[in-house]
Amino acid sequence: MNKKEGNNKKSSSRTNSKKSIPGGLPKRAQAPKKAKPTTEATAPKKTVKPVNNIPKPLKSDDIRLNKYIANSGICSRRDADIYIQSGNVKVNGVAITEMGYKVKPGDVVNFDGTLITPERKEYILLNKPKNFTTSNEDDADHRNVLELVRAATKAKIQPIGRMDKNTTGLLVFTNDTDMIRKFSLPNQKSTKIYQVSLDRNLKFEDLEKIAGGVTLDGHKLYVDEISYIDGEPKTEIGLKLRTPNVKVVRAIFENFKYDVLKIDRVAFAGLTKKNLPRGNWRFLTEQEIINLKNL
């Protein structure tokens, strides 16, 4: 796979500088006081260790039984709870009906008499091209994005979020259901950056209105950042949002009577298109996975 550096563009920002306030006048110097001689013995001072030095308990490798089953790809956690209560699950040959039971490393888990093992978690980043969609509906005009990452893994991966056939850019795939659920929530800390191409120049007063927040379908949507892109016509706009819904990007500008010609996601939760040409994919690094989990 040939790689070339992506062309991510940064939004310009302004900083306000503050003058430092001069300090007060220095106090008049005083002659040092003479120390009185003493012959009394002083008790040695006790050293107190700071609280931060107290060792933290090590993180356990135990995993809840319902999550263990869900990670194997058999069913969801909710369904796993039903099977556990029904006595369909055994750990080390013993039927477990206790909710919240934790599986330890080395335990043997059987589901309806079949040995199960959790899938290895896979995390893949794709620079999605046009005419591919996350929809499972059959359509002769477009294909499913899973075709582009089929050779990456045999695991049952899913895209995080949705993208229509005309939207391009970064899309993460994984079989980590916890991460998929996390990045599908309406309120989240992670940001996504889009480059939006409009049919005409975006008026500055409209840019300021969008920066102050937009009401869509009766709900107030706040924008983290919006700006013109340096060196580009004013039809090219940089937009940073926290919402996982790409359709919102189009709706923002259509609300101000602009036609959206193109939407390209250039950053997703700290991940960028650097060295990832259109239509190519790569595995996330261990550090990138840790960063996503800590968001």
Image (cartoon, grey):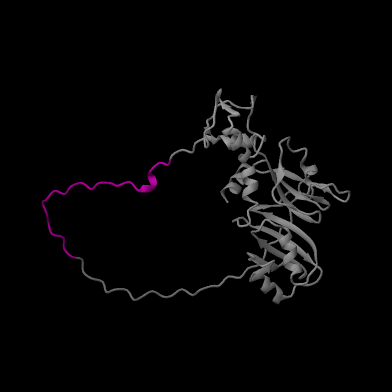
- Assess whether residue 53 is covered by the magenta stretch: yes
Quadrant showing the N terminus: top right
177 over 170 or under it: above or below: above
**Residue 218 percent location from the top left of the image:** 67, 67
- Can residue 164 be spotted in the picture? yes
206 over 281 or under it: above or below: below
- Assess whether residue 88 is covered by the magenta stretch: no
**Residue 147 percent location from the top left of the image:** 80, 42
Give whichever of 78, 247 is nearer the camera: 78
| Residue at the extreme right | 140
Q: Residue at x 71, y 36 (%)?
A: 155
Q: Residue at x 66, y 58 (%)?
A: 243
Q: Which residues are magenta?
A: 33-56
Asked where in the image residue 11 lies, by quadrant, the reply is: bottom right
Asked where in the image residue 112 lies, by quadrant, the reply is: top right
**Residue 185 percent location from the top left of the image:** 63, 53
Q: Residue at x 67, y 34 (%)?
A: 74
| Residue at the extreme top | 93
Give whichever of 184, 200 is nearer the camera: 184
- Can residue 229 be spotted in the picture? no
**Residue 249 percent location from the top left of the image:** 72, 62
Our reading of the magenta stretch's main secondary structure is loop
Tell whether 165 sits left or right of 181: right
| Residue at the extreme left | 39
Count of picture labels? 0
Give whichever of 85, 217 is nearer the camera: 85
